[in-house]
Amino acid sequence: MERKYMDRLVGKYCKIVMKEPGEERAYAIYGVIEDIDYDSGFVLVDSEQGLGCISLKTIIAIKPSRRREIRRDERAFVGIGTLIVFIAIILVAAVAASVLIRTGENLQQRANKVGLQTTREVSSGLVITDVTGYTDENKTHITHLALVVRPRAGSQDIDLRHTVLYIQYDRLAILSYSEDLGYTAPRVSEKGVFHTLNVTLNATTYGVIVIHDADESICRNHGMNIGDSAMIIVNLSASFNSSGLPPRGSISGKLVPEIGAPGTFSVVAPCVFTTRVIDLN
């Protein structure tokens, strides 16, 4: 390349194609041509590797090139994009945290509710402490039952209006509490337990006789609380449409409250009825 053309490249950013003696492949470097020493045969180049000299004998071609520079507005664009991504990550994390917190609160509320219901279900309930039978005049069948019930220890209040009595003999009989006048007696009559109620019990209802009710909750609002006890009177003849329970007959049942464990009983009648009042415990 002639000298007059080489001098035009001084101070410009160029692509310099070179090939060292003995090498098969050529390679290129990029840099600014600072000066050309024709006497010594070297080109002074300021490249990315720094300032250096290149022998004119190794240069195959020199081509002016454009230096790639990142403009300031492009740098700003990259910065704004990074900031947008960062803000988006923060928003996603905030939304996720909010969902987790709300879910945790809902689970805690449900757990507390379930725990209270479970505690009430387990601790509440009724207990049948005594079962007594009453026979007909000929002492051949037990026609009535008397079940003494009380709340379990630590039980919540029991509403007798929502209790159901299941009795299993030759079939299943279901009895409920009746709010009609006469189905509840505030105390035991002098004539005895089975002559206290002033109504004839039918096949679907049972009567209640108060044994102990300090606050009169059973008589006022049909509720049993701790310390109360009552007697459930059942007409077996009417419930099973028969003469009643014969000797050696077995009968079972359970008094189920609205919430809590039921009171259960299972008894067998003796082989001979010597009296009209029979203890079935």
Image (cartoon, grey):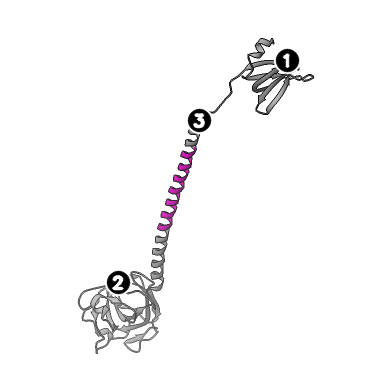
Disc number placed over residue 38 in the picture, else none = 1
Chain-order first, disc 2 or disc 3: 3
Specify whether 211 is left or right of 51.
left
Which labelled disc corresponds to residue 72?
A: 3
The magenta segment: 82-106
Q: Look at mark 2 in the image and give the residue it sits on.
A: 175
Closer to the camera: disc 1 or disc 3?
A: 1
Instruction: Look at the image and tell me whether residue 102 can be seen.
Output: yes
Q: In the image, which is nearer the foreground, mark 2 or mark 3?
A: 3
Which secondary structure, mark 2? strand
The magenta stretch spans residue 218: no
| Circles 1, 2 touching at the beta carbon (< 8 Å) | no
Q: Residue at x 50, y 34 (%)?
A: 78
- What residue is at 24 percent from the left and 83 percent from the top? 186
Q: Residue 153 location, x and y as percent?
A: 39, 78
Give the foreground label among 1 and 2: 1
Residue in view at x 37 percent, y 79 percent: 128
Mark sitting earlier along the chain (1/2): 1
Give amino acid for label 1: Tyr
Q: CA distance from mark 1 to mark 2?
A: 124 Å
Q: Quadrant of residue 150?
A: bottom left
The image shows residue 45 at horizontal and vertical percentages of 68, 22
Q: Identify which amino acid the numbered label 3 is placed on.
A: Arg
At mark 1, the secondary structure is: loop
Q: Position of residue 25 (x, y in %)?
A: 73, 20
Give whichever of 257, 155 is nearer the camera: 155
